[in-house]
Amino acid sequence: MRWYLPVILDLYSRCEIGWAVTDRMKRKLVFRALKPGIAFRTPPKNCSFPLRQAQSYCSPDYQKILRQRGFRTSMSGKGNCYDITAAETFFKDFKGELILR
């Protein structure tokens, strides 16, 4: 079985502040992860919000919510993961510590 886990990370505190999990990748899944992250931290305007090049994150609805909250979005080019390095590191550790043991 395959699981989908979008995570919202606070790079200042280096902790997870929003996440959601399901066995189907649906567009609304990333909204479910974003909502508690915003409520938990109440980020100030012009915070940087790095995005993946996935359909869910590039959707106009998701982009609209980020703009309404005052986020500045950034996205690396295809094949470059510089903007989401912290998320990639999180998932590497997550898989190594919780799944592969």
Image (cartoon, grey):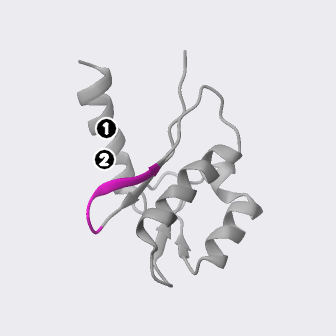
**The furthest residue to the front:** 39
**The furthest residue to the right:** 60
Dot 1: few (<14), some (14–19), or many (≥20) neighbours within 10 Å? Answer: few
Please name the residue shown 23% across and 29% down the image: 97
Amino acid at circle 1: Lys
Q: Are marks 1 and 2 in contact (CB under 8 Å)?
A: yes
Q: State the residue in front, 24 or 17.
A: 17
Q: How many marks?
A: 2
Q: Is residue 78 visible?
A: no
User: Pointer 2: what residue?
Assistant: 89
Q: Is residue 74 left or right of residue 13?
A: right
**x and y, in percent, of residue 35 in the image:** 57, 58
Q: Is residue 25 left or right of residue 94?
A: right
Q: State the residue in front, 87 or 26.
A: 26
User: Pointer 1: what residue?
Assistant: 92
**x and y, in percent, of residue 90 in the image:** 32, 45
Which image quadrant: the N terminus? Answer: top right
The quarter of the picture where residue 73 lies is bottom right
Which image quadrant: the C terminus? Answer: top left
**x and y, in percent, of residue 31 in the image:** 63, 53
